[in-house]
Amino acid sequence: MSPKRPVQHDAARRRFLTASLAIAGLAAAPTWLGAATRSETAPEAVIRGGRIRGFSDRGMNVFRGIPYGADTAQRRFRPALDAAPWERVRETTAFGQACPQRDDPAGGEGEDCLFLNVTTPALGDGGRRPVLVYIHGGGYANGSGSHPLYDGVGLCARGDVVVITVNHRLNLFGYLYLEELGGPRFADSGNVGQLDLVRALAWVREHAGVFGGDPGNVTVFGQSGGGAKIATLMAMPAARGLFHRAWTMSGQQVTAAGPRAASQRAARFMEAAGLAPDNVEGLLTLPIEQLLEASTAKDFSRVEDRSLHFCPVLDGDALPRHPFWPDAPAQSADIPMVIGNTRDETRAWAAEEDFDLDWDDLPEKIRQRQFVDIPVDTVIAEYRRLYPDYTPTDVYFAATTAGRSWRGAVEEAEARAHQGAPTWVYQLNWPSPEEGGRRGAYHTLDIPLVFGNLAAEGSPTGNGASAQRLAEQMSGALLAFARHGDPNHQDLPEWTPYSLPDRETLLFDDPSRMEDDPRGAERELYQRVPFIQRGTT
């Protein structure tokens, strides 16, 4: 689920492939708006903590770095507290810190990291606009809500909505499970990153009206790790009622880490940190750098994992069940949901040599990367039967996408279909024009299209007519979904909800079209074996 560091082909590639990992820079103008400008008028609002002052950007009111929780340094591995109030006007014009991580996000990083950013057309006008809360990617390890691709001005201007992005605890700070090593004081430690998101959504419900939004119409949307976090929230009792629609992009969480596996991972972390397994108190005073270094210990879940893989934990309390196994969570059955993926997910992480594989190279490459325990010879033989014109490189990317990135989306969609819950499924087929199109529709490509930020720093879409049409379709679908709970709009073919056995899927392309059970033979191949989420065993 958590993407690896991309191969560094050029500056543009580095910037974009880290969109769901690392965060950098200020927001660029959406395609349909002009260059970013800030007016002399500084909007102000009053929230629970006190008065805040933001800035005006292309006609929208923008507030950055609003604290929704207190500094977590004194609450390591425990649920956060409310932010302390302030007396004077607080300037909220710069991004707040991200959780400590092995990247360099905009706003810096530190344990004081519970911040969110709000963009809105109006303040306190009773507008009751749909509220869209974006949860960033980067697996559970990296990222923040301040990447240029996540700028909400364009969506707000086009759809008359409120857009919010959020930072929360990640990696060991958010998902290191310590209850079995440290006792009940740390009962929530494996899910405090998720509980931060619950706190942020509670803040949104409390303050939506201040920013011209409707607390009864909140859509959470997210890509990669952001989608996985949303899937997990759908099974968390504390999140019930805090959001009303869910839109996920290439991010699923079917199973969580069991307490045994999570405790074994914690013990390995303690050893790497130089502490005895029962010295959890010692973790509370270790420097951030030492903690991050300990997290690079080799994980035991996958051949490819080169560091410990932290993710939500089935702790019986904050997360009492697996998110989407053995079925979809009943508490979210009435929440409309969109589940999306890209056709060529794993081309995002390809090294140069991956584009020139031969048949002798292929078995070991697939064995390491498909993330599903199925005989490799069976996989290769089936792909060669299905697609006789495929090269070894084509088979590699197709198999690893189907086995690693797409399989979880299938599991979630089918669980929702069995439940009878309102669900729409898409697959992005349109290829990025970068590098002559050889990376296809790869992981993260849907972010600038959904936000409409084709001109933002790091966007690989270009600004051609085809990209413009697709951005209008995808961002329009998100806005329609947020407003009505249905993604259909006039610029799309009729998008039919997902059902069994038809498996209706909208293929976003130029032109977009509906198709029943696309890549059905690949789906059947991988459904021969059980699916276990990466990092959960």
Image: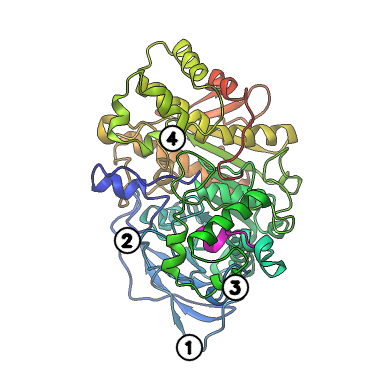
Task: Provide the residue span drawn in magenta.
Answer: 171-178
Dot placed on the residue nearer the N-terminal end, 2 or 1: 2
Residue at left offset 27%, top offset 44%: 8
Q: Is residue 513 visible?
A: yes
* Residue with the mark numbered 1: 88
Q: Residues within 10 Å of mark 3 (few under 14, many from 20)?
A: few
Residue at left offset 68%, top offset 25%: 500
Q: Is residue 511 visible?
A: no
Residue at left offset 39%, top offset 31%: 430
* Residue with the mark numbered 3: 281
Amino acid identity at mark 3: Glu
Dot placed on the residue nearer the N-terminal end, 2 or 3: 2
* Residue with the mark numbered 2: 25
**Per the image, is 173 magenta?**
yes
* Residue with the mark numbered 4: 345
How far is the residue under mark 3 from the one under mark 4?
41 Å
What residue occupies the far left of the structure in this picture?
10
How many marks overall?
Answer: 4
